[in-house]
Amino acid sequence: MRDGIRIARRGVPSISLVTDEFWPQGDFVARSVGMPEAPRVRLPHPVAGTGVERMALVAGDLAAGIIDRFRG
Amino acid sequence: MSTLEAIDEYEALEQLHALGCTDGLPVVIPTPDRVARMVLATGLDADMSLGTMGPNQGDCTVEKLAAAAVMAGCQPDYAPVVLAAARAVMDPRFDLTEMQATTHAIAPLIIVNGPAREWCGIHGGFGALGPGYRANASIGRALRLAMINVGGGRSGTSDMALMGHPGKFTMCLAEDEANSPFAPMHTMLGHDADSSVVTVVGVDAPQSVICVTDADDPTTPDRMLWSLASALANVTTNNAALRRGQAAIALNPDHAAVFAEAGHDLASVRDGVFERAQVSGAELLKSAGVMGAVDPDRSYPCFEQPEDLLVFVAGGGGLYSVVFPSWCAGPHRNRAVTMPIEVGQACEIPAFVNLRSEHL
């Protein structure tokens, strides 16, 4: 979340990827740095370490939605 | 600072628990009078900002820190130590924001050197990390309560430690300078022996290291260095997996005496552990914690320089010394920070003046 906000502050469009387990922390970080509406997309938890096949499935489910968010 | 109202202290405590302002244990209710007395003990203005405490980026004023000290059960005499510890963790090198938010189990270890140990009654001997010693327990707890209420580090929301450890309630001790054969640790860090300082480093839970000494065996000191190094080079520690960061080593007085008898001082113990704290590439590759490219045919130092190891004397004499590995994944590798304890500001507190004059 913090990385996404830092990137956004440099003027680069960003969307943070946040898993279920860390969603409340994402909300907290967004509020604490003064960007409560910073865009983020919710992922199932865990993603890291789940293997290429599983990660490809997650990416496939979410990619279109992420692109839509960038398009506004 | 906002004020709550309650009909009695019981209800006030329930409110504080309900608001998530405690560490889960009962606290002393920070009434305006109690907080004002704690502020007075700092000798500073209540609204003076000491820095920013992450991850909430809260403004840590003297008054907010004083409220945390009251809640933790501190005596006003402890205020300068709490203040120094808070300033240390807010130093950017400490990486507090990242440390509070990480999934790793890490907590600030507060090591107190110099005359403030005696003024405040901070224990460095048997069971120094507790339980049973008010100054140790409440000073470390005051910092934790500030990290919760000012820094916003709340478990499962902003403090994402997967398991945590009991040192996250409090972890403060003094170096046992009186029973150490060595010059105290803070002299290695550039401070005069008679100055009072805190050194704060973010560490894992303490790991016991057994060292059976034998006065008839001249290899004992070298084997002790290997044992301490092996505990830190354990392939499951972050220091070994990431091969960087800092760590602390608490030598018990018996072990310190064996090293001293062999001609060591704290610096040579530190250097000896550093040289031996190596992890083989083959062992790393067998482990689940390996990161980055690793050559199975070479060994890797777990630390970048000897100064990354803090060595001091504490605890009771016996078989066990202690090492504290660290997280070491922050932007500054969560560096240890040493901060002077400013006691001159507190001369308005009669009890404190008496204690000071007694020990000067």
Image: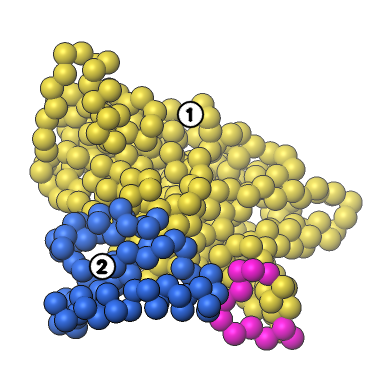
Nearer to me, B260 or B38: B38
- The residue under label 1 is which amino acid type? Tyr
**Which shade of the palette goes to chain A?**
blue
Residue displayed at 12% across by 30% down: B3
Q: Is residue B306 above or below residue B81?
A: below
Say if the magenta span includes residue B294.
yes
The residue type indicated by label 2 comes to Arg
Tell me where residue B261 appears, x and y as whole percent.
74, 53
Region in magenta: B287-297
Vertical comparison of B124 with B74: above or below: below
- How far is the residue under mark 2 from the one under mark 1? 46 Å
Asked if residue A7 is among those painted magenta in the image, a careful observer would answer: no
Q: Which of B345/B174 is in front?
A: B174
Tell me where residue B359 sits by quadrant.
top left
Return the mark for residue B49.
none
Crowd class of label 2 (few under 14; some 14 to 19; many from 20; radius 10 Å): many
Q: Residue beneath label 2, please?
A: A40
Q: Secondary structure at mark 2?
A: strand
Q: Nearer the viewer, residue A63 or B44?
A: A63
What residue does disc 1 label? B133
Task: Give me the residue at 61% from left, 74% from top.
Answer: B290
For residue B115, side relative to residue B313 (left or right): left
Residue at x 57%, y 67% (from the top left corner): B239
* Residue B194 seen by the camera: no
Q: Which chain is yellow?
A: B
